[in-house]
Image: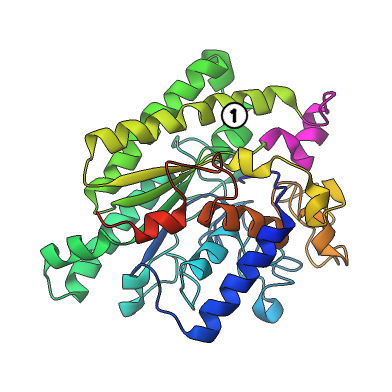
Amino acid sequence: MGSFTNACNISLIFSVIWMLQMLITTGAEPQVPCYFIFGDSLVDNGNNNNLVTEAKVNYPPYGVDFPGGEATGRFSNGENTADIIGKLLGFTNYTPPHATASGRGIVKGINYGSGGAGILTETGRNLGGRITLDLQLSHHRSTVFKIIGLQGGNDTYTKHYLSKCIYTVGMGNNDYINNYFMPDKYNTSKIYTPEQYADVLIQKYTKQLRTLYTYGARKVAVFGLGLSGCTPAKISTFGANASGCVDKINAAVALFNDRLKPLVDGLNKNLTDAKYIYINTTNISLGDPSSAGFTVFLSPCCTASVDFGKGQCKPDQPPCSDRGKYIFWDEFHPTEKANMGTASRSYMAASPLDSYPMDIRTLALLKL
């Protein structure tokens, strides 16, 4: 279950709302032909619904603020970050989950995100079923072959088509939350120091991102990890330090994030017809949350379960009424409003530190 704390600039939220309204009223064409999403529960939009797993949320009160009030399997009260980025890219429909995607619609993109998934294959096994990044990439390979078929069997055309699309990848949250910092279930913290573990993750992640390139991706946004040590669940488990968060978790996550910019540089140097960018989620989450109207920073909006799906909302229990004041929806995941802050600054950086070497908006317009 991916996690992060998000403190966004209120003026940027309003600018994003304005942009979304403009896109809707003008009927503008999407900036890219398709949008493919890889990740964990921060972007999962229903892929885990039919898995035998604790990491699924296809029940109320999840989705209370989603169009129609439907619990679709998104780990939020409303839209997740990927949903909002898709809108900012100009797509009028949500990118479908791989679990239900079919027909010609797949040429506009698929969401492969899965709650509990990680870079390492074993990550998240304590939760049950999940679709690891390796398996998400395998599914995408099959999707590419289907798209070739839908485009008349012309793989040259499909290669050119896919090179214009946006790909977002956000992985690693669970490699810490549901692996390294669960010593009773995983031995990684006994085998590796935090520095060594970050290296292990980056080595595999680099190979996975290169695999995505071999499947046609040329415009790829790699999301860093947020402040996992500030989630209500981790504070409850480990206790807060003077910072108000679990410092050892945030320090370990920072070691992983510190390696993502060099990772992007290396890929861009070796794959000269592609452009990888790094979204600095931690920087986006820094600042004064009260400036965006948040008043509840470290408590979840919904009543958390202590049984199945620990840390997720108890089924059918009413959530807090003023969800715009909460950063966290449940004990791991942000509210829709917090997601809007992250999505907006990923799409259009509010600080030079938000993204490197460019933001998603610039990447979408880039001619390769």
The x, y position of residue 253, in whole percent, is 59, 29
Q: Position of residue 366 (x, y in %)?
A: 32, 56
User: What residue appears at the point 53 percent right and 31 percent down from the top-left corner?
Assistant: 257
**Helix, strand or loop at disc 1?**
helix
The amino acid marked with disc number 1 is Val
Whether residue 33 is situated above or below residue 256 in the rendered picture: below
Where's the C terminus, which quadrant?
A: bottom left
Q: Residue at x 85, y 55 (%)?
A: 303
Q: Is residue 163 left or right of residue 21?
A: left
Local crowd at mark 1 within 10 Å, few (<14), some, or many (≥20)?
Answer: many
63 shown above or below 29: above
Q: Would residue 305 be seen by someone viewing this image from the given angle?
A: no
| Picture quadrant of residue 45 | bottom right
Which residue corresponds to mark 1? 253
Please state the horizontal and vertical placement of residue 287, each as a whole percent of the image: 74, 41
Taking depth in this image into account, of 322 and 69 the one nearest to the observer is 322
The residue at the point 50 percent across, 21 percent down is 197
Q: Is residue 3 left or right of residue 363?
A: right
Q: Residue at x 40, y 28 (%)?
A: 262
- Residue 83: x percent and y percent? 55, 65
Q: Nearer the viewer, residue 129 or 235?
A: 235
Along the line of sight, which residue is nearer the eye, 276 or 181? 276
> Does the magenta segment cover residue 230?
yes
The colour scheme of the drawn protein is rainbow
Q: Which stretch did the figure color magenta?
A: 228-245
Taking 254 as reference, is 216 left or right? left
**Per the image, is 154 magenta?**
no
